[in-house]
Amino acid sequence: MIVAPPEPASVVQVDPQSLYQAAVADRVGGRPAEAVAKLERVLAVRPDHVDARLNLGLALLALGRLDEAETAFLAVARQTPAYVDAWVGLARVEQRRGDLPAARRVAGEAVRLAPGDAEARALLASLASPPSWRVDITGARSRLSAGLPDWTEARVSASRRLGEGWSAGGAVEVTERFDDTDVYLEARLDRAFDGGDLHVAVGGAPDADYRPEIALVAGGSVRLTRRFSATLDASVARYPTGTVTGLHPGVRVDLPGDRVQLSARWINVRDENGDHRSGYAAQARWQATNRIAFRAGYADAPESSEGATVDVEAWNLGTDLDVTERLTLRIGFLSEDRGAYDREELSLGLGWRF
């Protein structure tokens, strides 16, 4: 008699309902990765288990795997169109992507399906009333090598939404370098639209020692695909020593899962002597959790400062912490090799939306 070998433990059947309940406990208990693994096993046996698929979407959303979460929520909505939690999930996916108009449309559909659903109504209310004002305050202190005096910097900026896609603002920046102090004033206008954005800023430092006497900056981005955007920035600045112009094309990439964003720019400068100089800058941002993001960057490019354009090699690290839904704390560190001396900067900032 031939005896069949026992099934491996990995394929032994488990009661789908018990496994589903354990997965929900994992998700609610803050263990979304464990929940995903269990829910995928449930759905392998019961692909029509609509509650399991909804919870899979919620667990994937908690992990920042937005594309997969969207697929799960859409499957629930197709299977059970009146399942309001699926529409709420889709609205939260769009909110996390930063597409607020789309998030409002989907949240509105959730409220239409279930006018008495408290979560759907609260989500729509939060999306319908975005903060009108944004204020950023930043301070920085730099230590220089070669026995040179420290640098300090303080900047306050404020902007206000003017309407759908429009915002305007201004900034005041006070810097001290080599015992000279400049006050730089700036006004800025931004326009966001489906698939891109534009901005223009004009500023200057009265009685400038090393900052531009007057400067004009313009640029924007356009989304080429779901994940790729092209960027372009241009500038012209008049310094006490001459005029410097810049043109910087670049690219921005959102990796699958929408947690990591990479960007790079080709830096092109015509300096105060009329010479063309070029370099590059690259930056990465990782949204580690819903509230914490990390930044890292590297650049090897010309920079105009202290009356001259010099080649600067620099790297930076930073983190953004959302203390509340409307208050963000930013910490940054920058290290530069400026040829004649090195510079290390520590910065601290607060962003407030109201």
Image (cartoon, helix red, strand yellow):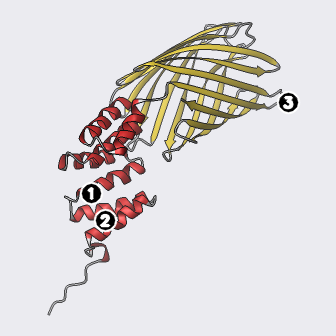
Q: Residues within 10 Å of mark 1 (few under 14, many from 20)?
A: some
Q: Is residue 203 above or below residue 348?
A: above
Q: In the rendered image, which residue does mark 1 sit on? A: 51
The three-letter amino acid code for the residue at tag 1 is: Asp
The foreground one among 197 and 239 is: 197
- Picture disc at residue 292: none
Quarter of image, res 177: top right
Of label 1 and label 3, which has the lower sequence position?
A: 1
Element type at mark 3:
loop
Classify the position of the C terminus by image quarter. top right
Residue at the spot 76% in from the left edge and 28% down from the top edge: 341
Of label 3 and label 2, which has the lower sequence position?
A: 2
Element type at mark 1:
helix
Q: Residues within 10 Å of mark 3 (few under 14, many from 20)?
A: few
Q: Is residue 106 above or below residue 23?
A: above
Q: Position of residue 129 (x, y in %)?
A: 43, 29
The three-letter amino acid code for the residue at tag 2 is: Tyr
Distance CA(mark 1)–CA(mark 3): 66 Å
Distance CA(mark 2)–CA(mark 1): 9 Å
Instruction: Point out the residue furthest to the bottom here.
Output: 1
Q: Is residue 37 above or below residue 210?
A: below
Q: In the rendered image, which residue does mark 3 sit on? A: 147
- Picture disc at residue 20: 2
Of label 2 and label 1, which has the lower sequence position?
A: 2
Q: Position of residue 7 (x, y in %)?
A: 25, 79
